[in-house]
Structures are given as structure tokens and as C-alpha cells.
Amino acid sequence: MGVVEVATLALSVFGAKKTYDYQKQAAEEAKRVGRLEGRQFVNELFLGKAQAIGAANQRRQEQTEAEASNFAFLIGKQGRDDRSVDAFLKRNEDLADEDIASIDRQTEILSAKYATQAAVAYTYGQNTASGLRAQATANLLTNMSDIAQNMSPSLVKSLTPGNKDKS
């Protein structure tokens, strides 16, 4: 058995193991990225809800201010009876309620979108990591098989216990 054969074998095994380690590391990175992307979409979901609450509050404030100014205008300027003023104010309130309901519907749609994206990103990261780990194992086994096939018979004989040359 030659020193070159043993050195070549050692380098081949070392290289196969290093390749396996790097592929496993890439799998863990893919898993981590999937988790981070999922968390980012959850953050977007909460941000969207907070913005919707702000928009609904702003619309309600605008409606309240418009009601106050319209009420004063209608009572002071036109002298209408209370029913027409109430009808006008009720219509403005209904419009504001419709706007807020529309904001709520849009928020729910965005929430569903971000929740789905978070789940997909997380699952994609997990699946990618699983695939990379399986590929790393398959590559390691293939590399070890190639190394075994390329070993010289004398090297195999010298490395197998009980098969030492009896010269």
C-alpha cells in the first residue's frame, strides 16, 4: 500500500465530508431564512392592521367634524325642521360607516394575504432545508461509493481487518 494511495483516500474522504457539511449548513440557512421571511410577513400583517385602525379612526374623526359643521350650517342658515337635518346627518354617518367597513374589508384581505405569505415562506424554508439535507446525504453516499470504487484492491486489502498480506 502506497503513501500516495492513503493520502488520496484521506483527501477524498475529507473532501466528501466537507461537501456534506457545507450542504447541511446551506440547509440550516434556508430554514432560518424561511423563518425570518415568515416573521417579516407577520410583521407586515400587524402593521397593516395598525394602519387600518388609524385610517378608520381618521375617517370617524372627519365624519364627526363634518357632522358638527354641517349641523351648525343647516340649523343656522336654512332653518329646516329637525327631520331633514337628522336625515342629512344620518346619510353622512352612513357614508362614514360604509367607508370604515370598506377599510375593514381591505384590512382582512391584506391580513389573509400576509398570513398566507408567512405560512408559505416558513413552509418553503422548511421544505428547502429538508431537500438540501436529503441531497447532502445522497451526495455524501455517492462520493463515498465513488471513493470505494476507485480504491486499488491492494489498498482495500490492507485496510480490511483480517485480510493482511501474509508475506
Image: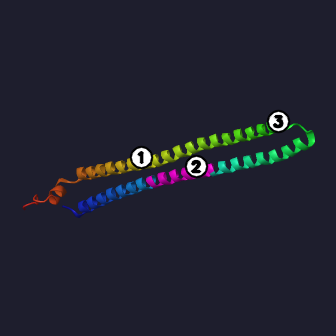
Separation (CA) of disc 3 from disc 2: 44 Å
Q: Quadrant of residue 101?
A: top right
Would you name the residue on which mark 1 appears? 127
Is the Cβ of the residue at disc 3 closer than 8 Å to that at disc 1? Answer: no
The quadrant of the image that shows the N terminus is bottom left
Q: Residue at x 80, y 40 (%)?
A: 89
- Which residue is labeled 2 in the image? 45
Q: In the image, what residue occupies the spot 17% across and 53% down?
A: 153
Dot placed on the residue nearer the N-terminal end, 2 or 1: 2
Apparent side of residue 97 relative to residue 45 in the rendered image (left or right): right
Asked whether 37 falls inside the magenta stretch, the response is: yes
Q: Secondary structure at mark 2?
A: helix
Q: Is residue 35 magenta?
A: yes
The residue at which mark 3 appears reads as 83
Q: Nearer the viewer, residue 2 or 35?
A: 35
Quick one: 137 or 70, which is closer to the camera?
70
Question: Which element is circle 3 on?
Answer: helix
Q: Is 91 positioned to the left or the right of 140 in the image?
A: right
Choose top left, top right, bottom left or bottom right for residue 16: bottom left
Q: Amino acid at mark 2?
A: Leu
Residue at 23% over, 52% down:
148
Q: Position of residue 50 (x, y in %)?
A: 63, 52
Which span of residues is magenta-colored? 31-49
Labels in figure, total: 3
Whole-percent x and y of residue 119? 49, 46
